[in-house]
Image: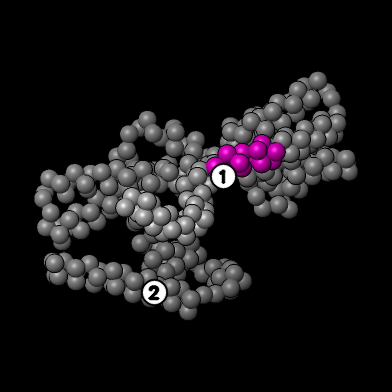
Amino acid sequence: MNFPALALGIGLLVSLSCGFIYAGILQWKTGETPKQRLERLMASQNPLEEEEMSLPFVDRVLKPWLRRQIQAAGRLAPARNIDRLQRNLVRAGYPYNLTVLDFLGIQIVSGLLCMIIVLYMMSLRKSAPLGAIFLAAIMGLVGFMLPDFWLRSRVRQRKAEIKRTLPDALDMLTICVDAGAGLDSAMLKISEKWKNAIATEFGKVVAEIRIGKTRREALQSLVERTDVPEVASFVAVLLQADQFGLSIANVLHNQSEQLRIRRWQRAEEEARKVPIKLLFPLIFFIFPALLVVTIGPAIPILLRIFGEMTR
């Protein structure tokens, strides 16, 4: 084994760990309340500069530098992926406040790390150079695609959450509208009281209306952000009711009832799929075990009987 390279890697990891632990302890020791920070900034002559200098070294230097490097790496990716990634990030709710360049940079860094790890492991085993390069290229591609798989799973989870919570949100909208509140006020109330994906989207709709968008434009943006058929049908009915001057309360009553029926139908559909999903585990795992338990004790007796018959 290449012990100097291994010792160098372990030493680097230990040094980084000690640095992060020291930065965390330093930030914990120098913590101050928001009131104390406000008083200190008001008493200083240049509050922005002092506030920036009061941040720990990790937040002031390392994190911005790492973000710039990730964004620079993200600019190397093909331009055709930017629109697709932008749509997926919007539909995933911008997890961890990642931008397109941040995500592309993470993909490139992940691919490079996988390649470096594979090359290092193959160098320790003293494998053939061509085989090591081929395997490193494959693992680099896998590492590049892993963040994309994670993002797609986040999109699917968020869509499923919106489908699951939309009927309850419409019931809440109906109650608020029946109580005399407007549609915008009802959406704002849900966004303030609930902490889920549909409440966040309702809050964005109200915020867009407040900055000057029409209700039609804000609701159409909601459909584009969520990409959920139930939300699209709900928005289409709302826009038609607004266009023809129909009662919003009656529309919400009908939509909430229809969505409850659809949710019940989806539950029945998933229940009907259970026997088919259980078929393969039964065939490959449960039935062989049952055969071994039931027929297994009789096999020695059958073998002895057939052996006596052949003599």
Label number found at residue 110: none
Q: What is the three-letter code of the residue carrying label 2?
A: Ile
User: Residue 292, percent across and down?
Assistant: 47, 55
Q: What is the three-letter code of the residue carrying label 1?
A: Leu
The reply to whether the magenta stretch includes residue 276 is yes
Residue displayed at 49% across by 35% down: 87
Residue displayed at 74% across by 47% down: 190
Q: Which region shows up in magenta?
A: 267-279
Q: Nearer the viewer, residue 138 or 11?
A: 138
User: Residue 66, percent across and down?
Assistant: 35, 56
User: Residue 33, percent across and down?
Assistant: 58, 73
Residue 221 quadrant? top right
Q: Which residue is mark 1?
A: 278
Residue density around tag 1, few if under 14, some if 14–19, many if 20 or more, within 10 Å: few
Q: Is residue 46 visible?
A: no
In front of the other: label 1 or label 2?
A: 1
Residue that extends furthest to the top in the rendered view of this protein: 244
Residue 101 against residue 192 in the figure, above or below: above
